[in-house]
Amino acid sequence: MRCTFGFVWAASLLGSSLGGPVKDLYARDNAVTYFDPETGFTFSEFKAAYSLSSNILYRVAVPSSVPAGAAYDAVLQIVAPNQVGWAGLAWGGTMPKNPLTVGWPNGAKPNFSSRYASGHTMPTAFTGATYQQFTTGNKSNGTHWTLTVKCTGCTSYTGTNGAVRLNPTGTNRFAFAYATAKPTTPGSNTTNFGMHDVFNYWSHDFSQGQNPTFATLVVKNGGTTTSGDAAL
Ligand code: HEM
């Protein structure tokens, strides 16, 4: 019996390393395409595990056919369980020196803030990125809250080593952070909030969130277009 058990155990470990959980882990490190029926945007979606059993969804939609080197806007959608007090996205994959978008529940309509950290201290307001919160895709129910915003200035910024432009058709290193504690003044986007409980990194594949009619969708969802929305 002991021998059989040992064999089965060894075989399942071998199986795991060849195809089972390894494949699952790999799959979790990639964004997949998600079509949002409410807004009409096609998003690249990543499930950021903040515990062994719970995820925050980070979705990014970009215009198709962005001209080489041109600045472009992106739509960010965050879907988080109600136990998440705030959820942040670091567009350059580190806490300091890149645009941070921080969202949190605030009654029927979640609130958010544009932030920037020069180090590992509370990020302050960042005017290098500007946002529009859509009339759609901003809600909460008994289980989740959903934030949907368009950002101008999140995909190009000045980082530690100079100008950075995220690849509109490829993978970009992202990071997220979350805390269960809510911000001090949820109705204000200059609110203070405490340090995160968890953070992590991933490669977000923008090729999964291409939108040939990006500018049209921006208007349909209550936004106004800028030059960065143009899909040629
Ligand atoms: C009150 C607000 C915050 C405080 C006090 C804070 C503080 C810190 C500290 C002390 C570390 C280093 C932790 C360690 O080395 O173990 C850290 C790391 C990190 N924080 Fe924050 N943080 C805050 C907000 C945020 C926000 C809004 C984000 C946005 C996504 C963020 C993203 C990260 C990431 C990705 C790391 C990993 C190290 C790095 O990439 O720099 N933090 N934070």
Image (cartoon, rainbow, N blue to C red):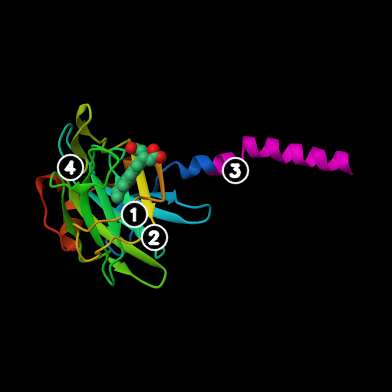
Residue drawn at 24 percent across, 58 percent down: 112
Horizontal arrangement in the rendering, residue 176 relative to residue 167 (left or right): right
**Which mark, residue 84?**
2
Q: What residue type is labelled 2?
A: Val
Mark 2 vs mark 3: in front: 2
Magenta span includes 19: yes
Quarter holding the N terminus? top right
Image position, residue 215 (x, y; %): 16, 52
Q: Give the range drawn in magenta.
A: 1-24
Q: Which amino acid does label 1 sit on?
A: Ala
Instruction: Please say if 170 is above or below 193.
Output: above
Q: What residue type is labelled 4?
A: Tyr
* Mark 3 residue's CB less than 8 Å from ligand 1: no
Q: What residue type is labelled 3?
A: Pro
Mark 4 is surrounded, within 10 Å at the Cα level, by few (under 14), some (14 to 19) or many (20 or more) other residues, namely: many
Mark 1 vs mark 3: in front: 1
Mark 4 = which residue? 72
**Which mark, residue 21?**
3
Ligand 1's quadrant: top left
Instruction: Please say if 92 is above or below 55.
Output: above
35 or 54: nearer the viewer:
54
Q: Are marks 2 and 1 in contact (CB under 8 Å)?
A: yes
Q: In which quarter of the image is residue 175?
A: top left
Question: Can the viewer see residue 146?
Answer: yes
Q: Separation of disc 4 and disc 2 at Cα? A: 29 Å
Horizontal arrangement in the rendering, residue 23 relative to residue 153 (left or right): right
Q: Separation of disc 2 and disc 1 at Cα? A: 7 Å
Residue drawn at 74 percent across, 37 percent down: 11
Image position, residue 100 (x, y; %): 25, 46
